[in-house]
Image (cartoon, helix red, strand yellow):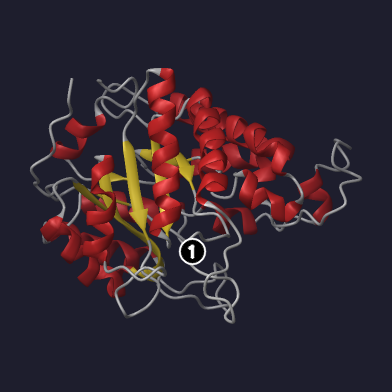
């Protein structure tokens, strides 16, 4: 089946290095929102009596303060991003249960995708189309790791619960206008398999198909994701999904991420992505991270110079200034070559 959206992305990735946007949470923090702001007060009293604290529930802002999310999207697009992520990292029923709002997950995803689509439509041109990446996050619960050190067999979520949560999310993201699904910041391959199963199920039921992007996170110098796999094992576990891109994001800055991106560049027969944090966390920094736009862009420019990547961007601590610097840096570079899979008709 041919792609029903995002059909020109494979060709674009072969012609030049594409750029994803930067951190959503970093920019939201700069608004210094209060508990009442998250609830939408005083303009709207819909969530005035909600029993749980809501400050920090960034996905709720898709509903209570859509103008903030739209403004952030516009900043990244103005900086030159080719793709922007929906504000839906934690917009699953599993994640929203922490705020006692699982029933709002679909509304959050639908609203977020529509906002990103609106922003992309404003900035797209025939020469530089912009794309909505429907962000599918890992959830705060893991299907592979016990939450109880005294009971290795214990689990706080099942594969079926994750599948159902992701199924609702991806349907709303597609309905809102997403061009690709981005399964990201994967620390547990089993969680990712639930998301990919849900996506495949959605494609089969609806008779549609859009590109899938997959991005894991290496959490320390061991070179493994949290559930224990090396990056090569991680790739081999998920390559059956035939992703458009496969790569790493978050956790480490680009300098520490390089050997793992280099490893993926050797084994992946698809486009490789990398969108790191702005270095390692530093609570004393204004953004929580130390790397300046010049530092991050220089590192990613080295990745592109050495033929390691096809798509770059920023994660925690990065801003529109970082994305602008990355866009300028990689514009002069050629994209990595790979033997792309042949999509079956």
Seen from the viewer's position, the closer of residues 333 and 106 is: 106
**Is 214 on the left or on the right of 110, as rendered?**
left
Q: Position of residue 341 (x, y in %)?
A: 13, 37
Mark 1 element type: loop
Q: Position of residue 55 (x, y in %)?
A: 75, 56
Location of residue 195 (image quadrant): top left
Q: Residue at x 51, y 35 (%)?
A: 167
Q: Residue at x 17, y 25 (%)?
A: 344
Q: Is residue 68 above or below residue 23?
A: above
Q: Residue at x 33, y 80 (%)?
A: 221
Q: Residue at x 24, y 26 (%)?
A: 8
Q: Is residue 106 visible?
A: yes
Q: Position of residue 345 (x, y in %)?
A: 18, 20
Seen from the viewer's position, the closer of residues 107 and 158 is: 158
Quarter of the image with the N terminus in it: top left
Seen from the viewer's position, the closer of residues 276 and 229 is: 229
Q: Is residue 57 above or below residue 127?
A: below
Location of residue 111 (image quadrant): top right
Q: Is residue 85 above or below residue 8?
A: below
Q: Give the total of numbered labels.
A: 1
Location of residue 209 (image quadrant): top left
Q: Residue furthest right?
A: 49
Instruction: Check disc 1: other Cα within 10 Å, few if <14, some if 14-19, many if 20+.
Output: many
Q: Position of residue 200 (x, y in %)?
A: 38, 33
Q: Is residue 78 visible?
A: no
The residue tagged 1 is 317
Q: Is residue 91 above or below residue 222?
A: above
């Amino acid at each position: 089946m041919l792609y029903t959206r995002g059909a020109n992305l494979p060709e674009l990735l072969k012609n030049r290095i594409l750029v994803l946007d930067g951190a959503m949470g970093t920019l939201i923090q700069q608004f210094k929102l209060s508990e009442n702001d998250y609830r939408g007060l005083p303009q709207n009293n819909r969530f005035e009596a909600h029993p749980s604290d809501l400050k920090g529930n960034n996905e709720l802002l898709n509903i209570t303060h859509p103008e903030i999310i739209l403004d952030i999207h516009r900043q990244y697009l103005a900086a030159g991003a080719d793709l922007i992520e929906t504000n839906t990292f934690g917009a699953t029923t599993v994640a929203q249960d922490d705020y006692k709002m699982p029933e709002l997950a679909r509304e959050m995803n639908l609203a977020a995708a529509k906002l990103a689509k609106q922003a992309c439509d404003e900035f797209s041109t025939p020469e530089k189309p912009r794309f909505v990446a429907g962000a599918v996050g890992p959830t705060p619960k893991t299907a592979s790791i016990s939450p109880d050190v005294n009971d290795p067999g214990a689990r706080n979520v099942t594969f079926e619960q994750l599948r159902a949560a992701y199924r609702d999310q991806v349907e709303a993201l597609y309905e809102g206008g997403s061009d690709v699904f981005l399964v990201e910041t994967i620390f547990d391959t089993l969680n990712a398999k639930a998301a990919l199963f849900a996506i495949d199920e959605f494609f089969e039921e609806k008779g549609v198909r859009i590109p899938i992007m997959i991005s894991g996170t290496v959490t320390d110098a061991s070179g493994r994701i949290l559930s224990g796999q090396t990056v090569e094992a991680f790739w081999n576990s998920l390559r059956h999904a035939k992703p458009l891109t496969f790569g790493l994001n978050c956790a480490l800055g680009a300098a520490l991420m390089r050997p793992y991106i280099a490893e993926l560049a050797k084994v992946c027969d698809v486009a490789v992505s990398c969108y790191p944090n702005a270095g390692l966390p530093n609570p004393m920094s204004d953004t929580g991270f130390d790397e300046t736009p010049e530092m991050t862009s220089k590192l990613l420019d080295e990745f592109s110079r050495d033929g390691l990547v096809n798509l770059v961007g920023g994660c925690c601590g990065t801003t529109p200034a970082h994305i602008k610097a990355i866009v300028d840096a990689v514009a002069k570079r050629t994209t990595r070559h790979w033997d792309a899979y042949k999509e079956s008709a």
